Amino acid sequence: MTPSETLKHEHQIVLLVLAGAEREAAAIRSTGTAHMAEVEEMLDFFTNFVDRCHHGKEERHLFPTLEARGMPVGGGPVAVMLHEHEQGRAAVRAIRDALARFKGGDRAAAGELADALLRYAEVLRTHIAKEDGVLFPMADRMLSAADQEELARAFDRVEAEEMGEGVHERYHQLAHRLGHA
């Protein structure tokens, strides 16, 4: 699998959890309560799988390689992607904050939790469409076979050394459970 294919496959896993987040937001709005354990699992997924693993591969490996091959990081597609990563992180902070307040008894935080889940899903869905449709095809044209091989090895190291043995697979299972609930 090429690095862009790996990232696109991870996007499919992310989209499953986003579907679960959107269903949870709708349930919160209709019932005024949250499935706290599931939202906590989503937060863990968003923090570790999406940001630490997936965005880590992009920010520490793909984007610098693209920059070395002539794609500017300070403007253009990479700058947009980095900005959207920050928007996603802000939405995750809002989810975490609203959930903490809800767990602490603030029932008004339920609506904010639903809003934050939907905001995160919207940011990520738009982001994924841009990467899959624009950035990754550009990257595939710019990167040499040697670049692709080095990125594939770097991505494997992220999964094995930074995430840990079996963690990636555990998140895949979680995504399938949350996405099809």
Image: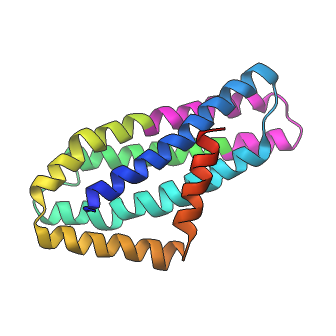
Quadrant position of the C terminus in the picture: top right
The residue at 59%/63% (across/down) is: 170
Give the percent coordinates (x, y) of residue 34.
78, 35
Residue 47 appears in view: no
Q: Quadrant of residue 118?
A: top right
Quadrant position of the N terminus in the picture: bottom left
Q: Give the range drawn in magenta.
A: 96-124
Give the percent coordinates (x, y) of residue 56.
41, 63
Is 117 in the magenta? yes
Prevailing secondary structure class for the magenta stretch in the rendered image: helix
The residue at 42%/53% (across/down) is: 10
The residue at 18%/60% (across/down) is: 66
Furthest-right residue in this view: 105
Q: Return the residue nearer the eye: 29 or 75.
A: 29
The residue at 56%/72% (across/down) is: 166
Give the percent coordinates (x, y) of residue 50.
49, 54
Q: In the rendered image of this protein, does residue 98 appear above or below residue 32? A: below
